[in-house]
Amino acid sequence: MERLKYISPTLTERTTKQMQIINWDDYFMAVAYISSLRSKDPRTQVGACIVNKSNRIISTGYNGMPNNCEDSKMPWQNKEGLEGKYLYVVHSEQNAILHAKVDLTDCIIYTTLFPCNECSKSIIQSGISEIVYLSDKYNNTEQTIASRFILDMAGVKYRQLISNTKIEVNFNNITQN
């Protein structure tokens, strides 16, 4: 009888946890968000996650300086020209595409920020068929208007993820069994 009392709470906990499984959109956006935490950009951290039709992660990326360029020696200011970051930073979507080692035809890219026109060109050229994004804070800029124009023309779908899911990661709460 004691054994049943011991097992029962464990089964109840497992059932409760299984009912809290997040959906694929939230899962992949969480991966994109966690990837964004690698960015050293002091103003805007953006992450991306590319998945195939089998819901397998193909690649991830975040905005940062090109390989072999020491971050501490690069400009991170929000200025135009050689003193600003804009001429140097590789966007998260581009990094994810460049790091992919397989064909991206019909894949979905999850990104924490709607892609600019340059990233949209790379998305189109790579064969990605859908974009799922969180923020659209630059929606009235020329880059974003141009981005939507070429995505529509190329038939790439895009949609904003609206989610009430709260995900907390605290490594101190993870225990070994």
Image: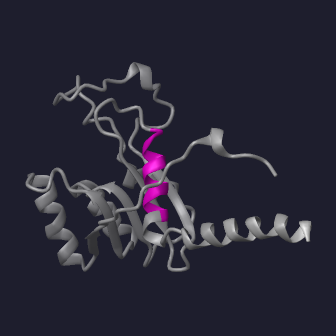
Q: How many badges with numbers are in the image?
A: 0
Predominant SS along the magenta part: helix
From the viewer's perspective, is residue 52 above or below residue 143?
below
Indicate the quadrant where residue 74 lies.
top left
25 or 129, nearer to the observer: 25
From the viewer's perspective, is residue 102 above or below residue 97?
below
Residue 171 screen position, x and y as percent: 62, 41
84 or 43, nearer to the observer: 43
Residue 45 screen position, x and y as percent: 35, 41
Q: Is residue 36 magenta?
A: yes
48 or 73, nearer to the observer: 48
Q: Is residue 66 magenta?
A: no
Residue shown at 31% from the left, 24% from the top: 75
Can residue 106 be seen at all in this image of the molecule? yes
Q: Quadrant of the N terminus?
A: bottom right
Can residue 98 be seen at all in this image of the molecule? no
Residue 130 screen position, x and y as percent: 34, 74
Residue 160 screen position, x and y as percent: 27, 66
Report the coloring of the rendering.
one colour
Magenta residues? 27-38
Indicate the quadrant where residue 20 lies.
bottom right
